[in-house]
Amino acid sequence: MSAEAAQRRSHPPIRVMVVDDSIVARAVLVRLLQNEPDIAVVAEANSGRSALAALAVHRPDLTLLDLEMPDMGGLEALPEIIERGGGRVMVVSSACGEGASASIHALRLGAADTLLKPGAGALAGSFARDLVEKIRRIAAEPSDLPKPGPRPLSIVPDEPARPAAPRPAQPRARGIDCVAIGASTGGVHALAAFFAALPRSVAAPILVTQHLPAPFMPYFVDQLQEMSGRPTKLACDGMQLASGGIILAPGDAHIGLARTRGIIHIKLERRRMPSGCTPSVDPMLTGVADVFGAGGLAVILSGMGRDGVLGAADLVAAGGEVLAQDAGSSVVWGMPGAVVTGGLARIALPPAALAREVAGRIEIQGAGAWI
C-alpha cells in the first residue's frame, strides 16, 4: 500500500450522496465509488425532491447531482441541497458538455464543480478517474473544520493554517484606478453575489480571471455581462480598458497589461505559471501592480489552491490593496485563505460586503481619467 493510500485510510471516508433518475447510472456510480476505501456512498436519490428528503436523515460531505430529472430537476434542487446540509455539490450530467450553459448555470447557483456524464457504457476508465479525483479534491476533510453557519456555502481549506490578522488599510493619495478579481472553485457563485451588490457608479475598469475551461468562456462572458450589468468582453491582445467595463481572461491565456504611448491595453501571456493554472490570477495582479501601482485593487474570491498569492504580493509591494472573501462564505477557502494567512489581504468579507467595501473606497472618476 502506498503512503498516499495509507493516509486516505487513516481518515474517515468522504460521505457521498448520489442523485440521478437513472437506475443504471446510479448503480454504476455507486459501484465505482465503493471501490475507493476513502469514499462511502451514504444515500441515493432519484430526483431533487427525494434528495432533499434524504437530507433529513443523511448529512453527506458531497452530493453528486444529475440535472435532467423528473419531479424536481437538479438546477431547481441545487441551492436547497446546499442550504439544507448536502455538503458541496458536484454536478454530474450529460448536460455538462464543453461550453454547456447548464454548467455555468450550475456553478452560478453554487456548484463546486461539474463533470460530463458519458453514456452508461462509458462510465468507467477516464470518467471514473476524473470523478474520484474531483471528489477528493473538493470534498470536506472530516476533521475539526468549522461547521457551516446559516450561509448555504461552507469551508474547504486547502491546507491547515491559522488565519493571520488582516492588514491595516494604507493611507491613499489617490483613488482606485483598476479592480482585478481572481476566482476559481465556487467563484462563479461568488462573482454573481459580488456584482449584484456593486453599484453601477463604480467606474473603474474591472479585470476578471476565473478558472474555467476555454470552451466555457464564450458563454461565461455573456453570463458575466448579465450578472454585472456592465459591458463585458473576452480579453484579446491590444484591447483597451474601458471605464465601467469588464474584461475576462480567456481560458487559454493569462491577462497581462502594457502601456503604449500612454494607452493601457491587454497583453495576453501564455507562459507556465507556478500555480499551474491557465488562466492564472498572478500575471493579472502583477500587471495591475506594474501599470497602476497604488491605484490597483485586487479581490480574491473562492477558489482552490494558491493562485494569486504571488501577484497579490507584487500589488501590495507597489502600494495597492488586496481584499479577500471570508472562509464562511467560500466554497473553497484556498485562494482567499492564502492571501489572508500570508498577511496580504486588508480584510476578509462575504462577496456582497466586499463589493460595498470596493464602492466605499473607490474614487468615482470620469471616463478616461485613469488612463
Image: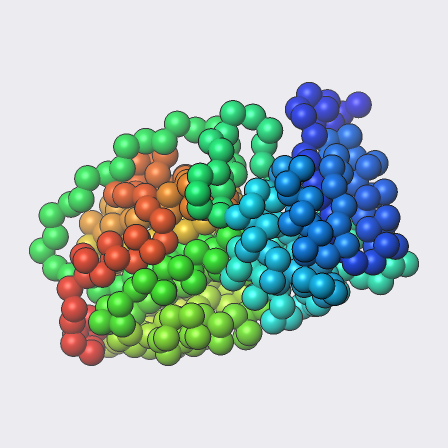
The N terminus, quarter of image: top right
Residue drawn at (84%, 62%), measured in percent from left and top? 119
Residue 326 locus on image (x, y percent): 37, 43
Closer to the camera in the image, 150 or 242: 150
Residue 123 locus on image (x, y percent): 84, 54
Query: Where on the picture, by quarter, is residue 219?
Result: bottom right
Q: How is the image coloured?
A: rainbow
Is residue 270 visible to us here?
no
View extreme (left): residue? 173
Query: Where on the picture, by quarter, is residue 67?
Result: bottom right
Query: Where on the picture, by quarter, is residue 161?
Result: top left
User: Is residue 322 rendered to the left or right of residue 87?
Assistant: left
The C terminus, quarter of image: bottom left
User: Is residue 219 rendered to the left or right of residue 149?
Assistant: right
User: Is residue 18 rendered to the left or right of residue 243?
Assistant: right
Residue drawn at (15%, 64%), measured in percent from left and top? 363
Residue drawn at (38%, 70%), measured in percent from left and top? 228
Q: How many marks?
A: 0
Residue drawn at (34%, 56%), measured in percent from left and top? 352
View extreme (right): residue? 121
Closer to the camera in the image, 335 or 55: 55
Residue 96 higher or lower than 299, as above or below: below
User: Is residue 215 rendered to the left or right of residue 152?
Assistant: right
